[in-house]
Amino acid sequence: MLEGEVMTDPMIQLQMDDHIRMALKEDMPFGDVSTAAVMPEKRMGHVQLIAKADGVIAGLAVFSRVFSLLDPATSVIAEVADGDHVASGQHLATVEGDVRVLLEGERTALNYLQRMSGIATYTAGVVAALAGSSTTLVCTRKITPGMRLFEREAVRLGGGSLHRFGLSDGVLLKDNHIDAAGGVALAIDAARASAPFVDKIEVECETLEMVQEAVEAGADIIMLDNMNHDQMLQAVTYIAGRAQTEASGNVDAANAAAYADLGVDFVSCGALTHSAPILDLSL
C-alpha cells in the first residue's frame, strides 16, 4: 500500500504486476537464501528511502508495488510525489513491514526507482535546454527491452513527451523502408494506400532533396535526420508548415540547446532512455 499521491500512467497500473513478478523471479528463483538464513521468522521493521543525489523522482508506485506483491501488508509512506525535484540527503519515504519482505524486495524496488528517476532527471535537463522555444521533446524506441512502459513514464514525469509507443501504432518510414519501396514518394504512396486513415505518415529524410520529395508526396511529419544545423534551417524554411517537423540524430543533454532556434515541432532524443545514468538512492 502506498500512502501519498503518485501519478502513474494507466497502462502501467494494468501491466506492471507481470513485469515486477518477472523481475522478482529473476532475482530469487528459489527464494532469498541469505534472508532465510538470518531471519527465519517474521519480524516487523522499517527502512528509510534517502536521495543520495539531486534529481527528479519517478517510479514510486512501481517501487511500492514490489513490496506489496511480496506482502500486501507492507506500507510505503511517501513524503514526495513522482515528478518532484529532490535534493541529496532528502528523506523520500519510509517502508514498513516484515523485515524479510524489506530485504527480499529492496534491490528490485530500487532498480526500478533508480532507473526511472535517472531518466526523469536527464529528461528534465534536456527540457530545460529547450526552454523558451516552441519545440517539444520526445523519446524514441531506444529503450531497455522489457522496460518500455516504465521508461516512457519516466520521460513524461521528467517533462518530456512521448513518440509512438511501438511499431504497431504509427507509420514511420525510415531509410530502410524507403530503400525497400524504391524511393520516398513510392514509400509514402504505399503507406497511404494501406495504413488506416487515422494514421499520420512520418518520413525520415537525410537530405534536402528527400525533404522536397516528402513534401510533394504529402507526408504529414518529416524527420530531419542527422542533418547539420544549416541544413535543418533550410529544410524547415522549405517545408513552411506544410508538414510537421522533427529533428533527430545524436541529440543529448550537451547539444540540445542548439536545436532551440530551428523552429522544428519536435526534437527526438534517444539518449533520454539509452544514456541516462541512474539517480543514486538508498534504502
Image (cartoon, rainbow, N blue to C red):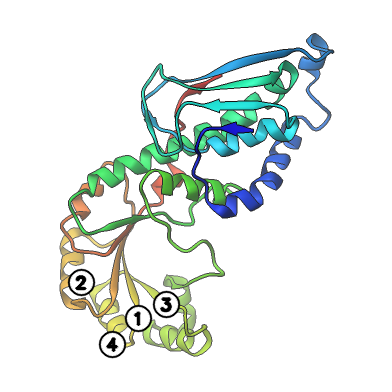
Look at label 3 and name its amino acid: Lys
Separation (CA) of disc 2 from disc 4: 13 Å
The N terminus: image quadrant: top right
Which residue does the image show at 49% across and 71% down from the upper left?
Answer: 170
N-terminal label among 4 and 3 = 3
Q: What is the spatial separation of the Cα atoms under label 1 and label 3, in whole angstroms? A: 8 Å
Q: Left or right: 205 with respect to 238?
A: right
How far from the left and from the top, in percent, is residue 225? 32, 64
**Which residue, given by chain and number where applicable, does mark 1 sit on?**
219
Question: Do the residues bearing badges 2 and 3 touch, measured as CB atoms within 8 Å?
Answer: no
Please name which of the two marks, 2 or 1, marks the residue nearer to the observer.
1
Residue under numbered circle 2: 235
Residue under circle 3?
Answer: 200
What's under tag 2, amino acid-wise? Ala
Secondary structure, mark 1, is loop
Q: If the image is split into quadrants, where does the C terminus sit? A: top right
